[in-house]
Amino acid sequence: MSGTIERDLTAWLRAELRDPGLRIGALRRTSVGYSRENWVFEATWQADGEAQAQAQAFIARRDPAGSVLETDRRLEFAILSALAGSNVPVPRARWLDADGTRLGRPSIVMDLADGVCDYIVLNGDRPLDRRLAIAQRLYDRLADIHLVDWRALGLDRVLENPGNKAALAALDYWEAELRRVQLEPEPELELVIAWLRDRAPENAVVTLVHGDFKPGNVLMQGDEVTLVLDWETAHLGDPLEDIGWVTNPLRAGEHRIPDVWEPSDLIARWSERTGLPADPVAVRWWNVLANFKQAMTVLTGKHAFADGRFDRILHEPVAIYRLLFNLIEA
Amino acid sequence: MHPTIIEQLDGLRRILADTVAPEVTAPYPAEILGGVIGALNALQANLHAVPDFLRWDIETTLDVLDTAKPLLRAALAAEVDRAKDGTGLYDLAVLEAKQVLLRGLLVEAMPAILAERGAAYAKMMALFRERADRFPFSMAARPPVKKA
């Protein structure tokens, strides 16, 4: 498979960089990423009028045959391109193959940046004071996302604005995903849908929402957060969707430092930085939706595995169901 | 009948782990192979529990539906009665089909159960919680540390 990718990537980059002698090397598919194929490689080419060859590392993100999430590379590319003009640090998106003409399936090529993704950085080996400082910087980045002037960046031309019905729009989207991928009746999720529909809050503001903000989706150099990655689920909506995601008890091991950086600390700092309130009832609603989304990624993966399009076996997300019952019966 | 299903699963896992895995060095295939070996382990360890789990799920879901029957429209209540036929519940394929049928009936009955919030609701929530505890397979692996 890597032979075909190497040939197709070479042809694509030769066209984009206008050098028929461009070569790529060190191509490998990383094991990271359940939703997209990530291919890292180095390209060497000679730019027009330049005497010396250039070499640079890139990453190609290609839609897999099947995955835990189905998203649109066109939107991801548009968001990355728009945010290049903001104070939110994002990878430099170079080229888009929206319809799969170049690599067989929709893909994006981005600059490969230095740094490390570490999903347990907040509970890793660093001393507590450094971990707390990282947590503060990390969730300040989330606040910065919510402070982005998305109209000025033109994002309202590519993303749908749900108005004050962001919760219902999100629920409609994920319920439609359930109908699309479910292999069998899922009464537990029907119960959750009924609970969510009865209590959907209205949002006070519309902001850019990352959709999967977590330590594992940022790039770090030392203790600094240098890039925010994985924008494939970003959309316009209620910023409390991201707050519900990062305070989800299921992912506490990634987002929380026990007794030092609790959800209440995160929310207080976020509110101070954004000037936005975080109604606890609404945050709980988004916690429930966060787990519904988590369950949906598992069901999407189950569906893709059953179709022969996904290489991992996933089973019914009963641990997530258990947490959902606790949340809705609290 | 040797090799039994369990013996075959164990043998396949051993071949992959001892003979194939040491030769697989590329990161993605190595990770996927690790997942396959883990899945074979889980299947071998839990296969025997599947029929009992399905029988328990069927019986308990039927009990919820039976409790909810007075709340249901006549046609749905009649479907619940028809589902009580216990023929063939030693056959795995029959058990799997019956479980899907009953969970589908529970979805249909849910609006009435939620509207009443009575005994059927309490039994349904107890079913859901115990079912989560009894489910014979775990969901997924932990996410890996990644470098970009």
Image (tube, coloured by chain):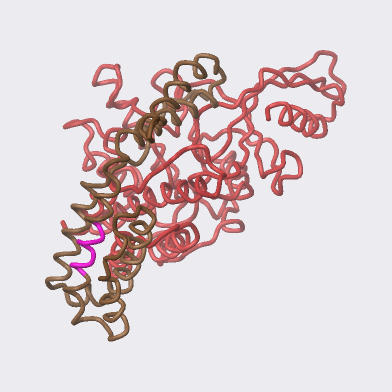
Q: Specify the quadrant of the image occupied by residue A16.
A: top right
| Majority secondary structure of magenta residues | helix
Image position, residue A258 (x, y; %): 19, 31
* Residue at 46% over, 63% down: A179
Describe residue B94's horizontal placement relative to residue B20 as left or right: left
Q: Is residue A85 above or below residue B143?
A: below
Image position, residue A214 (x, y; %): 39, 37
Q: Which residues are magenta?
A: B57-64
Q: Tell me the quadrant of the picture where the C terminus of chain A can be found.
A: bottom left
- According to the colouring, which chain is brown? B
Q: Is residue A35 above or below residue B98?
A: above
* Residue at 58% over, 49% down: A153
Pick the residue in front: A153 or B116.
B116
Query: How many labels, in total?
Result: 0
**What shade does chain A have?**
red
Image position, residue A137 (x, y; %): 36, 31
Pick the residue in front: A84 or A254.
A254
* Residue at 22% over, 72% down: B114
Describe residue B46's horizontal placement relative to residue A15 as left or right: left
Image position, residue B118 (x, y; %): 13, 73
* Residue A297 lies in the magenta-colored region: no
Q: Specify the quadrant of the image occupied by residue B111.
A: bottom left
Q: Specify the quadrant of the image occupied by residue A11.
A: top right
- Residue extending farthest to the bottom is B74
